[in-house]
């Protein structure tokens, strides 16, 4: 699920971007330049987990929630999956449809989507689940996932680990500055994270600047901070059995996932990786 726009300002651009409320989702090519994955590590990670945890030969019907530019969905379609991608961003979906013709793309929300048929695998990567900020939204999203999965189907998710912030402040100590050059223009983001303890959210403020912009573009958003045992409880209540919950390796860890990598048993890192199976109705 693409980030919901919370705050934005008018911008006069000096580059080729569409300067709306969310620079990255409004400009999918810039998004892919900012977060490259030339080896398709995220999609290959998903395929590996499905192969490891499917009870038999894995089914090929896959739903990618928060599909964004369709990069992962397109790769998985190319290796034999029948893929549907779902996202909130119309611009992301338009871009994805042009580039990944074998994938069906649908505009929708994690909390309310309803698609015909069932899927063998549902993926929810890059903390997309954490845009569900309260318990009701999380319960609705997980209930939707269970309804859309075939019996024995797998949910594969990757997200921030809320427990990491109990003893680590490295991501909170100061702003992170990152620049990306795209179509001859250098775009610089200055990102600040802080914890909203009352709401159990990791809040983020990202300020974009680039040559020719009359003023900065400010973007605020938040992720729900989920703890491992809390996540297990929510999944159990939604009708899932957790098969694996680990911090590394993953597509965004150091070192990153690679084929044949052993899954860690600890949960001390800043990422959570989940494989859960839809529980049989009779269980």
Image (cartoon, rainbow, N blue to C red):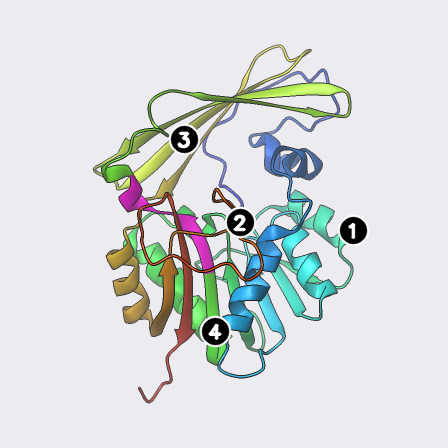
**Nearer to me, 153 or 163:** 163
Neighbour tally class for label 2: few under 14, some 14-19, many 20 plus, Cα within 10 Å:
many
**Nearer to me, 192 or 218:** 192
Tally the numbered discs.
4
Would you say 265 lies left or right of 13 here? left
The residue where tag 4 is placed is: 53
The residue where tag 1 is placed is: 98
**Secondary structure at numbered mark 1:** helix
Name the image quarter holding the C terminus: bottom left
Would you say 103 lies left or right of 198 here? right
Q: From mark 2 to mark 4, how far is it between C-alphas?
A: 18 Å
First in residue order: circle 4 vs circle 1: 4
Q: From mark 2 to mark 1, how far is it between C-alphas?
A: 25 Å
Check residue 72 for magenta coloring. Answer: no
Q: Quadrant of residue 83?
A: bottom right
The part of the chain drawn in magenta is 157-164
Q: Residue at x 33, y 62 (%)?
A: 139
- Identify the disc placed on residue 204: 3
257 lies above or below 16? below
**Secondary structure at numbered mark 4:** helix
């Amino acid at each position: 699920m693409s980030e919901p726009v919370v705050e934005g300002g008018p911008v006069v651009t000096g580059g080729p971007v569409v300067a709306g409320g969310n620079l990255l989702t409004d400009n999918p090519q810039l998004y892919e330049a900012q977060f490259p994955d030339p080896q398709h590590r995220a999609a290959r990670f998903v395929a590996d987990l499905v192969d490891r945890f499917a009870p038999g030969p894995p089914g090929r019907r896959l739903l990618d929630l928060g599909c964004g530019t369709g990069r992962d969905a397109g790769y998985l379609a190319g290796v034999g999956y029948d893929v549907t991608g779902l996202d909130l961003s119309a611009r992301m979906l338009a871009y994805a449809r042009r580039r990944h013709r074998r994938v069906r793309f649908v505009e929708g929300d994690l909390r309310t989507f309803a698609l015909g048929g069932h899927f063998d695998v549902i993926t929810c990567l890059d903390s997309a689940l954490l845009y569900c900020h309260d318990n009701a939204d999380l319960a609705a999203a997980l209930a939707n996932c269970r309804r859309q999965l075939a019996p024995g189907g797998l949910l594969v998710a990757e997200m921030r680990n809320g427990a990491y912030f109990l003893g680590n402040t490295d991501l909170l100590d100061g702003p992170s500055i990152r620049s990306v050059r795209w179509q001859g223009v250098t775009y610089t983001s200055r990102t600040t994270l802080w914890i909203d303890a009352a709401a159990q959210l990791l809040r983020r403020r990202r300020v974009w600047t680039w040559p020719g912009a009359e003023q900065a573009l400010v973007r605020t958003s938040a992720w729900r901070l989920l703890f491992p045992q809390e996540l297990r409880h929510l999944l159990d209540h939604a009708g899932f059995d957790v098969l694996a919950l680990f911090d590394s390796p993953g597509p965004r860890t150091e070192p990153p996932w690679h084929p044949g990598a052993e899954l860690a048993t600890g949960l001390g890192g800043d990422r959570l990786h989940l494989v859960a199976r839809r529980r049989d109705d009779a269980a």
